[in-house]
């Protein structure tokens, strides 16, 4: 028996084909930011590397334009 079983089902990326990665789409970008305000890793997001790069650029642009906070300081 294999101790480390992998799922045979292929994971679908968490961005649907009709969703565009854009800095103005803050509801989409909030899904890729942790509670502390950090950009989540590619493995947690289940994105391709190309999608992860464009998500990171869009999040950084949205932060500069004050559409997203740089950090969540709710403490």
Image (cartoon, rainbow, N blue to C red):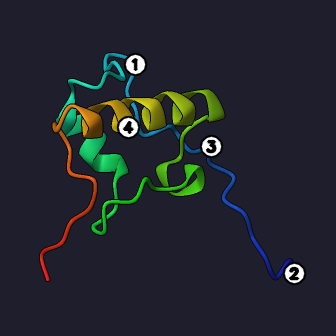
Compared to 23, does 70 lie above or below? below
**Dot 4 or dot 3, earlier in sequence:** 3
**Which residue bears the numbered disc 3?**
10
Sort mark 4 into few (<14), some (14-19) or many (20+) by Cα contacts within 10 Å: some
**Dot 4 or dot 2, earlier in sequence:** 2
**Which residue bears the numbered disc 4?**
60
Q: Residue at x 18, y 72 (%)?
A: 73
Between label 4 and label 3, give the one nearer the viewer: 4
How much space separates mark 1 and mark 4, taking CA atoms?
22 Å
**Which residue bears the numbered disc 1?**
17
Q: Is residue 36 left or right of residue 47?
A: left
> Is there CB contact under 8 Å for labels 4 and 2?
no
Q: Depth check: 65 or 50 in front?
A: 65
**Which residue bears the numbered disc 2?**
1
The furthest residue to the right: 1
Compared to 47, does 74 lie above or below? below
**Dot 1 or dot 4, earlier in sequence:** 1
**Dot 1 or dot 2, earlier in sequence:** 2
Between label 1 and label 4, give the one nearer the viewer: 4
Between label 3 and label 2, give the one nearer the viewer: 3
Q: Residue at x 54, y 39 (%)?
A: 47
How much space separates mark 1 and mark 2, taking CA atoms?
38 Å
Q: Residue at x 36, y 23 (%)?
A: 21
Sort mark 1 into few (<14), some (14-19) or many (20+) by Cα contacts within 10 Å: few
Compared to 15, does 46 lie above or below? below
Q: Quadrant of residue 29?
A: top left
How much space separates mark 3 and mark 2, taking CA atoms?
21 Å
Locate residue 61, reporting x and y percent: 33, 30
Q: The residue tagged with tag 1: helix, strand or loop?
A: loop
**Dot 3 or dot 1, earlier in sequence:** 3
Q: Depth check: 3 or 22 in front?
A: 22
Q: The residue tagged with tag 2: helix, strand or loop?
A: loop
């Amino acid at each position: 028996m294999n101790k480390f079983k992998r799922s045979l089902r292929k994971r679908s990326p968490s961005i649907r084909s009709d969703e565009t990665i854009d800095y103005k789409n803050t509801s989409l970008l909030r899904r890729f930011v942790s509670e502390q305000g950090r950009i989540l890793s590619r493995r947690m997001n289940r994105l391709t590397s190309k999608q992860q790069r464009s998500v990171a650029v869009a999040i950084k642009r949205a932060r500069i334009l004050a559409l997203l906070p740089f950090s969540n300081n709710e403490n």
